[in-house]
Structure formats: C-alpha cells, structure tokens
Image (spheres, grey):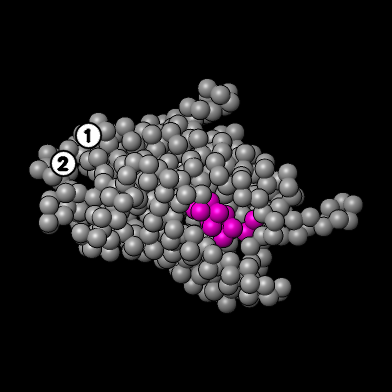
Amino acid sequence: MSRRAQSDGESTSESSSPEAEALIPLYNQPSVSSNGQRKNVIIHLDVSSEQESSSSSPPSVAPVAKPMTATTAKTQALQLLFGAGGIYASFLYYGSLQEDVFRYISAADGTKFTHAWFLQALESLANVILGVLALVILGFTGESRKWWGGTPNLPKKPFLSSGFSQVCSKGFTSLALANGLSFPVATLAKSGKMAPVMIGSLILGGAKYNLREYMQVLTIIGGTAILSMGKKKSSEADDSTPLGIFFIIMALAMDGVTGGVQKRLLADLKRVNLTPQPYDLMTYTNAFMMLFALLISTVTGEFFEGLSYCARNPEVFQLIWKFSLCSAIGQSFIFYTVARFDPLVCSTVTTTRKIFSVVLSILFKGHSVSMQGWMGLGLAIGGILSEVMHKVQSSDKMVKSKTSM
C-alpha cells in the first residue's frame, strides 16, 4: 500500500469499489513553509491492497509518534473494533448478497437476474445519496454552519473519466458473475489486479519489479486458475464459462486503466489548487458512475428490463437494495478507519475480508470443491497474505528508519 504526502491541495478520487480501490485523503493538516506561508498537506493512501509497484515513492511526511496512555489505547482499540467491524460486517454481507443476486432464479419463469448495468446504477445511486447526506451534515455541523459541506468551486470534469473506468470495472465483474463465473473465483481473480498494472507499467512506463512481486502475482493467478479447474461439476452452471472469464479479464484491464486515470485526476485538481473531502470524492465519482451505468443500461435495454424483472420478482429487489446499502455504509466505514489509523490497518482489514468472503462462500453457498481446488485456494490466499506481510515488514522498517534519524 502506498502512502504519499502531497501539498497544495493535491487529491484524487475514491473508487466506487466498496473497498475503495483508489487514493483517498486521510486528513488535511496545515503546515508552515520556510517563507512563513501556510500550506495544506494531504496524506493519501492507496486502499487497494493489490496495486503497488516497486517504483512507489516513499512518504515525505512521517506520522509523529505520541505517548500512548491507557485511556488512549482503550479508545483506539474501540475505534478499531468499530471501524474494522463495520467493514467486515458491511462487505461480508455485501459479497453474500452480490452472489445471491446473480444466483437468483425466478420462481415464475425460471429466469436468472443478469442485468449488471442496472445493478451498478442502483448501487451508485445509494452511494450518491449517502454522500450527499454526509456533506449536508458536515455543512450544518461545521464552523461555517452552511447547508452544504462540500468543497466550494470543485470542478466536476476530472471525476468523469474516473467514474467511467471504475463503473466499467464493477460492471464487468458483475457481468462475469452473471455469465457463470463463480463468486470465489471472481473475487480471487480481482485480487490479482496488480497483474494488468504491472504489464502496463512494464510496456509503457519501463517500470521494474523484483522477484517477490512477480511470484506474488503468479501465485494469486495460478491459485485462482487451479481453484477454477478444481471445482467439482455442478448441475447449476459451469464455473469457468469462456464469457465469464472474458468479463473478469476486462474488469482487471479496467482496474489497470483506473490507476492512470486517478493520476490525471490528481494533476487536474492540483492545477486548480483545491482539496476535496472524502465525501466529495464519494459523491461525485459515484454520480458519474451512476450516469454512465444509466446510459449503458438504457442503450442496451437493461434498465427497463431490470425494472420489469424486479417488479415480477420482488425478492431479488430486496437483495439489490440491501446490496446497495451495504456498499454505501461500507464505504463510510472505510473513510472512518483510514482517517484514524495507519493505512496498513485498512489494507489488512479489506484484504483479509476478501479471503473470508471466499471461504464463507465455498462453505455456505453450496460450492463443491475438490482437493485440487482447495490447494489452489490455499495458494492464492498465500499470495495475498504474503503481500500483507511484506507491507507490515516495510512499514516497520520505515518507522525504525524515521525514528533513528
């Protein structure tokens, strides 16, 4: 996970992905420059636990160690329990609901729910509503006592491309599930999203990676492939349909595009010297995601077909609105956690959450996995955990080097 200190209001967009596959500002801290002028310093973190290259620049601002009292330790423990517990509860249920939506079969006509873009429109709408409510509350409770707590004069155009790339990533993931790819395989495959980032950086940016990073990506991809091939035959569907695999590859490709789009978003916001708040990012990114999802679903006919399907099958609509609500609530818990703890904490929580989602899905959703499949699952989880362990070690070394200076 990369953490960077940036000045002059440099920020970026929060990903639509419930678990924030983007850079987000931790806090806005005033500092004094050498000429006596006050500047805003924003510490960013990359909540995506899969996108970090060896070329990541080290943080130029280090956290200041404070004496830990018993009261402070207890408070932080309760805050961590609240934040991490909220992330786990929201996104474990989110994953379960997502799988249930795409495995739903209508009792009336035996059809399945396949309206992925319609689903993305509703999920983005839920995030927009919660983001707007949060900004209104921040406005009324802030020092200015205004009705709107968003950043004044914030340009909206930079969020357009970010919203498009992120909704495409989520839409393609949903299409993979709708076309027969199992939830465990899709979730593990998305954990290997560093692969397209690495390929793009090697071809276009001349980046270099060490052996550990290559092995980490290979173990995740290889383990996912073994799990996919090691699933026992089921009467429900083929878990490795070519179309499902195609869409998950497209989702990974869009994850790679998103990284470059976010860098451009940072540059655009820096040029106008504005620092958006986390809920600005959540609101405007999801607003564009919703518009693109509405446009795509309307052109393809999915929107009205989705409405009609939900009208005929109110049970699936209940799953969808719960799914969308979990997405928005989980996003808020991520903001809460990253604002109070080291970025490594949030990365560890979100990464291990994916592992639990996969295991719980296999155990309780009727997936039949062979011994080969369990070996593949273990290999993929090992690759994911190795990344977490590497970041913990890197963080410890960084803290030691800062304290010794």
Indicate the amino acid at tag 2: Ala
- Quick check: 290 left or right of 401? left
Q: Position of residue 221 (x, y in %)?
A: 35, 34
Using a 10 Å C-alpha cutoff, classify the residue at mark 2 as few (fewer than 14 neighbours), some (14 to 19) or many (20 or more): few
Residue 383 shown in magenta: no
Total marks shown come to 2
Which residue range is magenta in the image?
275-287
Mark 2 touching mark 1, by CB under 8 A?
yes
Dividing the picture into quadrants, the one containing residue 275 is bottom right
Where is mark 2, residue-wise? Answer: 237
Residue, x 67% and y 60% (percent of image)? Answer: 151
Taking 135 as reference, is 51 above or below it?
Answer: above
- Quick check: 335 left or right of 150? left
Give the farthest residue toward the left.
235
Q: Nearer the viewer, residue 331 or 86?
A: 331
Residue, x 88% and y 56% (percent of image)? Answer: 36
Residue 83 seen in render? yes
Q: Position of residue 84 (x, y in %)?
A: 44, 63
Q: Position of residue 236 (x, y in %)?
A: 13, 44
Where is mark 1, residue-wise? Answer: 241
Residue, x 20% and y 56% (percent of image)? Answer: 364
Dividing the picture into quadrants, the one containing residue 370 is top left
Q: Nearer the viewer, residue 10 or 184?
A: 10
